[in-house]
Image: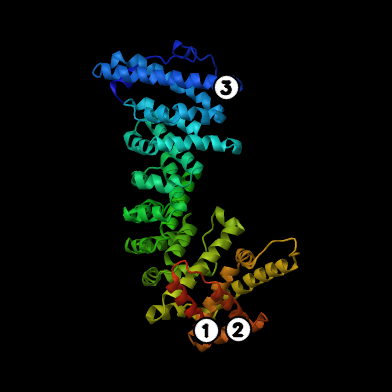
């Protein structure tokens, strides 16, 4: 805080009826009813006049803060009065051409941190709207702010504020609120803001802080938004050591639970970020090198609140990435994974939800399918197959339990779709297939793949067990083959045409053996 800011603090801030704003005869109480375009323009012009007067005074007396302190107080008052505009967003398209966005953006560069903070607070109000009818008007303001370089200025101010000061910590929170609002209004800004600023670095640094607070939670939320649908940002974060940074952040909870619901939400955000950043192949490599597999297994063994999140992260890391699967086996992850597969999961408040249990089951099934797909030979493969022989093939029993459950679900959904009046329902084959996937078809396909790998091993004991269980459930190997055929025909080329061909060839080989 500079000397002028200190002077402002020592003086009593004028109230809304002070002469500084006398030329706009509006009160906060009736602003919503009476604020029209003419009054709004007067508000904006009064603000711009105070801003100009203050800048001139600062230039004229740069070494004498007392000489421009009064203009600083007046500018602060006018900034507060501009908050009235938040109640009339329909006026934004008329105010933008006469300088609303550019003037507010210029205030973000002010030497007085109090005024910069006031600008962030004001922008948070002006860009926040839940009314769909206001959306085009607020978007017009957002676009103008971007054109006025507000994104760069907002991110720069995050490093400028000192969170040791409660007022400046609040300013950081308001700045993050503006960024969130702009991203909500214009999702395409996610790539732009990360490409042109150091926002990702600031967020990563903020999340490494050991102490939890509201701004750390907000930083985790903003990072999750930036990564969610942006492969470019996922790669950018990996390039600045973001995978390791996120692992450090979640490692604080490997042996303890969050203390509050807000801290719990932050931890979920961190795992969301970790799963998003694991989409690019190169970040999976960084995850393995940073001992992310080991950390997730430790978290699972500790059986704390992050247990299910660790399983989800492993699923992302191991999907179509053999090195992660090999590391998982090497660091004795099979025992932990198969304990979850058999239903031995820690009890917590989430467990009471059926959806929680179901998601865990599906993630574990996916992990085991990834292990079979990523480990094709050698001692690791034997250790994986050995798990299905243990305790009289109890894990094959469990697998068939899952098979029948998901098979019944998919069959029920297929019959429901067949009974619909297709003349009244526009549904092509892709939509029909997607409905079946939502009903559990993908998990059923993974279970069928695991059964196929078990059969492909040639082990007589396991084959006998599979055949027995199929008969007991009035099923045949042909039922399994039919599911695998459908899976084969719908394998996508998300990882490229070569990987698609390899996946189809492996599936075809399993089908041929059944």
Q: Alpha-carbon neighbours of circle 1 within 10 Å: few (<14), some, or many (≥20)?
A: many
Quadrant of image for the N terminus: top left
- Marks 2 & 1, CB-CB < 8 Å contact: yes
Q: Callout 1: helix, strand or loop? A: helix
Residue drawn 56% across the image and 53% down it: 349
Q: Callout 2: helix, strand or loop? A: helix
In this rendering, the label closer to the viewer, 3 or 1: 3
On screen, 40 above or below 379? above
Foreground residue among 509 and 363: 509
In the rendered image, which residue does mark 2 sit on? 477
How far across and how far down the image is residue 65, in percent? Answer: 28, 17
In the rendered image, which residue does mark 3 sit on? 36
On screen, 18 above or below 282? above
Left-right relation of 511 to 413 = left
How far across and how far down the image is residue 6, in percent? Answer: 32, 20
Q: Residue furthest top?
A: 19
Foreground residue among 204 and 228: 228
Residue drawn 38% across the image and 51% down it: 249
Q: Callout 3: helix, strand or loop? A: loop
Q: Earlier in the sequence, mark 3 or mark 1?
A: 3
Left-right relation of 60 to 462 = left
Residue 435 seen in render: yes
Measure the alpha-carbon separation of dots 2 and 3: 74 Å
Residue 213 seen in render: no
In the rendered image, which residue does mark 1 sit on? 455
Q: Alpha-carbon neighbours of circle 2 within 10 Å: few (<14), some, or many (≥20)?
A: some
């Amino acid at each position: 805080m500079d000397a002028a800011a200190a002077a402002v603090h020592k003086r009593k801030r004028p109230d809304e009826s002070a002469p500084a704003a006398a030329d706009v005869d509006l009160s906060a109480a009736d602003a919503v009813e009476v604020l029209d375009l003419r009054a709004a323009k007067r508000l904006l012009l009064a603000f711009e006049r105070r801003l100009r007067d203050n800048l001139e005074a600062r230039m004229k007396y740069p070494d004498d803060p007392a000489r421009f302190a009064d203009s600083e107080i007046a500018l602060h008052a006018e900034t507060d009065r501009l908050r009235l505009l938040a109640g009339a967003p329909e006026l934004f398209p008329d105010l933008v051409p006469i300088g609303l966005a550019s003037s507010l953006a210029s205030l973000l560069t002010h030497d007085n941190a109090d005024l910069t903070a006031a600008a962030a607070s004001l922008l948070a109000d002006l860009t926040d709207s839940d009314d769909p009818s206001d959306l085009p008007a607020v978007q017009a303001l957002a676009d103008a702010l971007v054109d006025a370089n507000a994104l760069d200025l907002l991110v720069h101010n995050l490093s400028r504020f000192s969170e040791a000061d409660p007022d400046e910590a609040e300013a950081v929170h308001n700045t993050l609120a503006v960024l969130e609002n702009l991203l909500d209004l214009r999702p395409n800004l996610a790539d732009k803001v990360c490409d042109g600023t150091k926002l990702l670095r600031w967020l990563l640094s903020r999340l490494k802080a050991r102490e939890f607070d509201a701004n750390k939670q907000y930083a985790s939320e903003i990072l999750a938004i930036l990564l969610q649908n942006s492969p470019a940002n996922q790669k950018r974060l990996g390039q600045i050591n973001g995978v390791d940074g996120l692992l450090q952040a979640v490692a604080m909870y490997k042996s303890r639970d969050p203390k509050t619901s807000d801290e719990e939400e932050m931890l979920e955000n961190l795992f969301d970020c970790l799963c998003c950043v694991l989409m690019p192949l190169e970040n999976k490599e960084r995850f393995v090198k940073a001992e992310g597999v080991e950390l997730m297994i430790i978290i699972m063994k500790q059986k704390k609140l992050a247990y299910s999140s660790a399983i989800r992260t492993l699923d992302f890391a191991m999907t179509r990435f053999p090195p992660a699967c090999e590391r998982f086996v090497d660091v004795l992850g099979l025992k932990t994974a198969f304990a979850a597969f058999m239903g031995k999961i820690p009890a917590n408040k989430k467990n009471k939800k059926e959806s929680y249990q179901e998601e865990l089951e599906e993630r574990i099934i996916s992990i085991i399918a990834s292990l079979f797909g990523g480990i094709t030979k050698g001692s690791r493969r034997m250790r994986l197959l050995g798990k299905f022989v243990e305790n009289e093939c109890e894990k094959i029993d469990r697998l068939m339990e899952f098979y029948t459950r998901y098979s019944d679900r998919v069959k029920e959904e297929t019959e429901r779709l067949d009974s619909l009046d297709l003349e009244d329902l526009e549904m092509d084959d892709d939509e029909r297939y997607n409905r079946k996937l939502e009903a559990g078809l993908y998990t059923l396909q993974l279970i069928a793949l695991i059964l196929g790998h078990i059969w492909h091993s040639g082990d007589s004991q396991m084959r006998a067990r599979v055949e027995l269980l199929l008969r007991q459930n009035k099923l045949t190997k042909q039922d399994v083959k039919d599911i695998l055929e459908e899976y084969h025909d719908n394998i996508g080329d998300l990882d490229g045409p070569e990987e698609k061909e390899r996946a189809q060839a492996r599936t075809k080989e399993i089908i041929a053996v059944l």
